[in-house]
Image (spheres, rainbow, N blue to C red):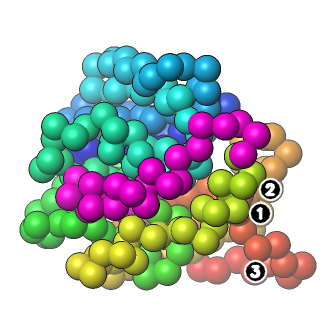
């Protein structure tokens, strides 16, 4: 299973945090990573650079949460049996992350897709090449090559969250677990943006989330 990371050219700080956490895990060197970095509108085509077990792809589109899936669709057609664990750059992992990923590989045969949670998975989860290519037209409809249309595609993305999971009749929740806990809002990256941190035990994954519903009395859930 390959680790597919959705990123943006202005998110280097977040990407560094993610890889710092991953590199502390014993099995880091045994996995292949594909980092799809959106926002390079001036490029005529993708630029692919490989550093050890990490492939960095500069993408000439910014398709919000769908950047990485569209990139797989357009660059990895010759790998029809591949399976990807898709996550965002605004995450970090615990020490059991790769152990849990290996457990997923052992537990689920003939995976088409696995979602992170029963509801609102933020598109995070496992995708087979089969399910990605079955949704080719849907994904291409989410492709944004115009910087001025970013806000438009962000709005569309809200309505299209988890669409591929929803379209897949065989989709399941990873180990039938969802959100385990969340924190109160904090400025995690020091950028002035308040974010909550959600923890998902099934992956030992922390999601640093900016898109949350702000409430006056935001309670800590344990």
Kind of element beneath mark 1: loop
Q: Position of residue 98 (x, y in %)?
A: 28, 50
Marks 3 and 1, the one that precedes in the sequence: 1
Question: Dot 2 surroundings within 10 Å: few (below 14), some, or many (20 or more)?
Answer: some
Could you tell me which residue is drawn at 75 percent across and 51 percent down? Answer: 151
**Mark 2 → mark 1, Cα distance in angstroms:** 6 Å
Residue 137 colored magenta?
yes
Numbered disc total: 3
Left or right of residue 130, residue 88 in this image: right
**Mark 2 → mark 3, Cα distance in angstroms:** 15 Å
Q: Looking at the rendered structure, which numbered label has been put on residue 219?
A: 3
Q: Position of residue 147 (x, y in %)?
A: 71, 36
Residue 20 seen by the camera: no
Kind of element beneath mark 3: loop
In this view, 152 is above or below 57? below
Q: Position of residue 177 (x, y in %)?
A: 38, 79
In this view, 175 is above or below 140? below
Could you tell me which residue is drawn at 16 percent across and 37 percent down? Answer: 78
- The residue that label 1 is drawn on is 185
Q: Assess whether mark 1 and mark 2 are in contact (beta carbons under 8 angstroms).
A: yes
Marks 2 and 1, the one that precedes in the sequence: 1
Q: Looking at the rendered structure, which numbered label has been put on residue 194?
A: 2
Marks 2 and 3, the one that precedes in the sequence: 2
Residue 206 colored magenta?
no
Q: Which residues are magenta?
A: 124-149
Question: Dot 3 surroundings within 10 Å: few (below 14), some, or many (20 or more)?
Answer: few
Residue 216 seen by the camera: yes
Could you tell me which residue is drawn at 64 percent across and 63 percent down? Answer: 156
Which quarter of the figure has residue 30?
Answer: top left
């Amino acid at each position: 299973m390959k680790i597919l990371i959705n990123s943006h050219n202005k998110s280097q700080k977040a990407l560094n945090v993610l890889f710092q956490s991953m590199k502390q895990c014993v099995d880091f060197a045994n996995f292949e990573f594909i980092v799809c970095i959106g926002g390079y509108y001036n490029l005529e085509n993708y630029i692919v650079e490989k550093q050890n077990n990490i492939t960095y792809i500069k993408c000439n589109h910014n398709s919000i949460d769908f950047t990485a899936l569209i990139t797989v669709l357009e660059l990895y057609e010759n790998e029809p049996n591949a399976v990807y664990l898709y996550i965002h750059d605004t995450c970090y992992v615990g020490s059991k992350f790769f152990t849990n990923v290996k457990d997923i590989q052992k537990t689920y045969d003939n995976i088409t897709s696995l979602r992170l949670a029963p509801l609102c998975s933020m598109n995070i989860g496992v995708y087979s090449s089969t399910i990605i290519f079955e949704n080719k037209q849907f994904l291409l409809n989410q492709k944004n090559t115009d910087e001025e249309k970013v806000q438009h595609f962000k709005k569309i993305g809200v309505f299209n969250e988890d669409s591929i999971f929803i379209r897949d009749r065989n989709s399941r929740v990873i180990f039938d677990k969802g959100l385990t806990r969340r924190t109160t809002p904090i400025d995690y990256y020091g950028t002035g943006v308040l974010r909550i941190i959600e923890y998902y035990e099934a992956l030992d994954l922390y999601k640093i989330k900016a898109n949350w519903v702000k409430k006056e009395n935001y309670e800590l859930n344990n």
